[in-house]
Image (cartoon, rainbow, N blue to C red):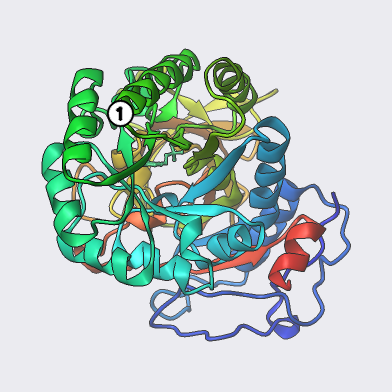
Amino acid sequence: MAPSAILLNPEDTIIENYDKNNLLVSNHGRGKSIYANTSLAPKELVKQILLERASRIDTDACDPDEENAFYVADLGEVYRQHMRWKTNLPRVKPFYAVKCNPDAEVIKLLAALGSGFDCASKTEIDQVLGLGVDPSRIIYAQPCKTKSYLRHAANVGVSQITFDNADELYKIRSCYPNAEIVLRILTDDSASLCRLSTKFGADLETAADLLRLAKELDLNVVGVSFHVGSGAADPSAFTKAVTDAKWVFDQAATNGYDLKLLDVGGGFTDETFEVFAAKLNDALVDHFPPHVRIIAEPGRYYTANAFTLATNIIARRDVSSLPSTPRSSDSYGSDISAVSTSEKSYMLYLNDGVYGNFSNIIFDHQHPIAQVLHSNRAADQDKLVEYSIWGPTCDGIDVISEHCYLLGTLDIGDWLFFENMGAYTKCSATRFNGFKDTHEAIYISSEPGASALLGY
Ligand SMILES: Cc1ncc(COP(=O)(O)O)c(C=O)c1O
């Protein structure tokens, strides 16, 4: 699909609201773009933009923070994932999990595409409502809510909310008695990257008790929700969870409830989506008649691939004299065909790390793969060189890759890039050691449909 609009050349681009103190920039595609109507594949296009932006920075002369890490976000990727969702899960309406990446352009596009939203806090609710989204398109899917946030949800009319314990039911009765409440049940999420059922979800016995209590408290239970764990690896977790949800629907009926909503949560990934969708569809056909409304809360599925991060090498240490052994976890970020290995070995220090956008290493158990974006020196370009890659803080745990091979001898001022950095990255960045927790994003669209909706 031909990219429809982008912006990167400063002469050709108007950057709105550019504020150096707040480097979160929306570079909307105004003016001519040198890549407009290009036939570059989306990934290649992203790389060109990263390269163009990085090569404009002279680290020997630039102002502080000009060389900061930055993103290129391809909203066309989000658009394609939405179309893929609709093809494979036509019965399931996505409520995008804002927590995964609350980027304003992502939310704007998904709002325009008609998606719903899973919000976890007042801020997320307000962000989505601020775009004119109707409160009925939001589920406040946090089973253990702050009381004042619950009152806020009531005030702004966000009525779909989840719960999973008796104390929450009493809280709901006092703060929001006419809410449409959704009972979150436990799942087997043992095969997922980030387990959630250790913290949330009622087992089936408790679920039955909660339905009785909800009836006693005269609360309006409308459905059941679950989450099979973020980064789920076992599609049969959906089969079991849907079967359990059906059991809870039946229990609810014996308590006088006629449930109408099933929320199948998140856990979908780009790599396994079709397999998971097929399993889920089968289970839904087996257990839930068409009049039951099905929603989901996908997060990483939508955004993981849409964001690519470029980082600058700010320091280097030659550790060639120290012994090293290749490991099974070695990553090869570049094309390794027909190359020999250098004797040299270096530690590279980047201007972003696990306290910044690489927070996904700590919180989301990811292993970002470094690739060379721009190197000022051409030394040993035909050789694989051994590196470890570190973040900029003074903490020893700030390591991005303990061991990897990249082509060529990289030096201070060179740039690396990392794909698949759109999920659970910048939203959990900190300011530890005085570094910034916001980074510039250059927004592009490799899909005309997304460009039209966003006005790019
Ligand atoms: C309640 C809830 N819904 C949805 C999600 C999104 O999950 P994923 O990104 O795996 O789709 C999460 C992630 O933590 C969550 O806690």
Asked if residue 324 shows in the view, the reply is no
Residue 392 vs 238, above or below: the answer is: below
Amino acid, disc 1 = Ile
x, y percent for residue 230: 40, 33
* Above-or-below relation of 165 to 348: above
Q: Is mark 1 within 8 Å of ligand 1?
A: no
Report the number of discs.
Answer: 1
Give the camera-side residue of 144 and 335. 144
Residue at x 51% of width, y 67% of height: 104
Is 28 left, or right, of 435 in this rendering?
right
Q: Quadrant of residue 188?
A: top left
User: On screen, 322 above or below 107?
Assistant: above
Q: Examine the rendering and report whether any part of residue 320 can be seen.
A: yes
Q: Is residue 69 left or right of residue 52?
A: left
Residues 151 and 390: in front is 151
Question: Residue 110 appears at what percent x and percent y?
Answer: 60, 57
Q: Which residue sits at x=32%, y=57%? A: 429
Nearer to me, 284 or 229:
284
Point out the image quarter for the C terminus: bottom right
| Side of 366 where 76 appears, left or right | right
Determine the secondary structure under disc 1.
loop
Q: Residues within 10 Å of mark 1 (few under 14, many from 20)?
A: many
Q: Nearer the viewer, residue 46 or 451?
A: 451
Quadrant position of ligand 1:
top left
Q: Residue at x 34, y 47 (%)?
A: 141
Q: Is residue 284 above or below residue 306?
A: above
Image position of 378 (left or right of 155): right
Q: Which residue is mark 1?
A: 185
Percent position (x, y) of residue 159?
37, 57
The x, y position of residue 200, in whole percent, is: 23, 34
Residue drawn at point x = 29 percent, y = 40 percent: 362
